[in-house]
Image (cartoon, rainbow, N blue to C red):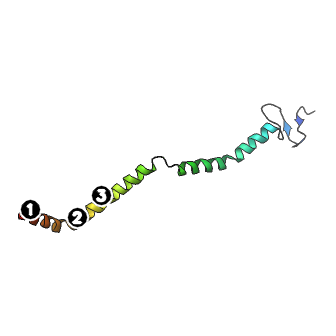
Amino acid sequence: MRHESVAESSGTPSSGVGREAVGSPKRRHQVESVKLIPMRAYLALTSLRDREEGQAMVEYALILALVSVAAVGILSLLGKSVSSIFSEINADL
């Protein structure tokens, strides 16, 4: 003699402890929530990417770094000639 009941919709034994019925509104809501996780993650990452707070400061820092690297590069290439030009100007004064 079997003491387990068989769920009408799925044909599987159900103990009735801690399980929602497959077609219950609460269970459907849980399944829909799980299905929406990738979309929510995509929207969250998109909103983080599109935020413009602090973006101007980062742009200014990048420009400053680029100008500094360019200045060091140019002065290292032309260092001797620039030094001689300044020496001539200093001597003339």
Q: Residue at x 66, y 50 (%)?
A: 39
Left or right placement of residue 5 versus residue 87 in this view: right
Residue with the mark numbered 2: 76
Choose between 46 and 63: the one closer to the eye.
63
Residue 27: image location, x then y, percent: 78, 39
Q: Name the residue under label 1.
A: 90
Within-10-Å neighbours for mark 1: few <14, some 14–19, many 20+: few
Determine whether label 3 and label 1 are within 8 Å by CB: no
The residue type indicated by label 2 comes to Ser
Mark 1: secondary structure: helix
The quadrant of the picture occupied by the C terminus is bottom left
Instruction: Identify the residue under disc 3.
Output: 68
Indicate which disc, 2 or 1, sits on the residue closer to the N terminus.
Answer: 2
- Sequence-first disc among 2 and 3: 3
Residue 6 is situated, as x and y percent measured from the top left of the image, at 89, 38
Residue 35 image offset from top left, x and y in percent? 71, 47
Q: What element carries label 3?
A: helix
Residue type highlighted by circle 1: Asn
Of residue 12 and residue 77, the one placed in the foreground of this image is 77
Residue 80, image x, y percentages: 16, 67
Give the label on residue 35, or none.
none
> Residue at horizontal 32%, vertical 59%?
67
**What's the residue at 14%, 64% (across, down)?**
83
Residues packed near mark 2 inside 10 Å, few (<14), some (14 to 19) or many (20 plus): few
- Mark 2 touches mark 1? (CB < 8 Å): no
Classify residue 34 as left or right of residue 56.
right
Q: Which of 2 and 41 is in front in this view?
A: 41
